[in-house]
Image: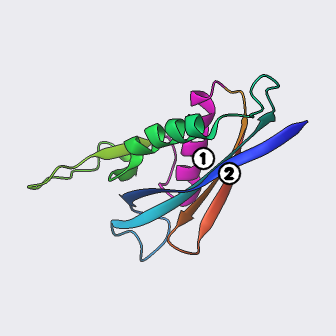
Amino acid sequence: MRLRIGIENFTVDSAHYTLSSEPNSQIHGHTYRINVEIEGEVNPATGFVMDFDELRRVVKEILRRWDHKLIVPASDKDKVRLTGPFRSEIMYINAPYPTVEYIGLELAKEIYESLNGKFKITVKIYEGLDSYAVIEYP
């Protein structure tokens, strides 16, 4: 029997631009709230689909790389210049736009790969308080 377990309310603070949505082509930021579920079989030796502490560790490690970054499509790599008297870090994604849909898809892929493809992954990612995307991977 397959079961789903999850952890809610991870957060990442990042910036992006969405050239596909006027007037939001301006760089702007969000606190992304992220819920993660995995689906799999209960391990009879442990009674777990996966230990919550281990799932939390894996997800936090992935999200740490996304936190406080400017998220940019890889195709724009040669077009973006960000300089100033501050640390600037850019997260390049293999997507046409850095929208919540594509950001969630990238996160779901990373979690799936980090868990060696053992589980179906569902990511619900909120951009602000009330707007979200749900991604099931694979």
Residue 72 is situated, as x and y percent measured from the top left of the image, at 39, 50
Question: What is the chief secondary structure element of the magenta stretch?
Answer: helix
Q: Is residue 128 magenta?
A: no
Q: Is residue 113 magenta?
A: yes
**Mark 1 secondary-structure assignment:** helix
Residue type at mark 2 is Ile
Q: Is residue 86 left or right of residue 46?
A: left
Please give the range of residues in magenta. 94-116
Q: Is residue 43 left or right of residue 86?
A: right
Mark 1 / mark 2, whichever is N-terminal: 1
Question: Could you classify mark 1 by the number of other residues whose Cα lies within 10 Å: few (under 14), some (14-19), or many (20 or more)?
Answer: many
Mark 1 near mark 2, Cβ–Cβ under 8 Å? yes
Residue 11 is situated, as x and y percent measured from the top left of the image, at 46, 57
Pointer 1 residue: 105
Residue nearest the observer in this picture, 72 or 10: 10
| Residue 75, visible in the rendered structure | no
Residue 2 is situated, as x and y percent measured from the top left of the image, at 86, 38
Residue nearest the observer in this picture, 20 or 126: 126
Residue type at mark 1 is Leu
Indicate which disc residue 135 carries.
2
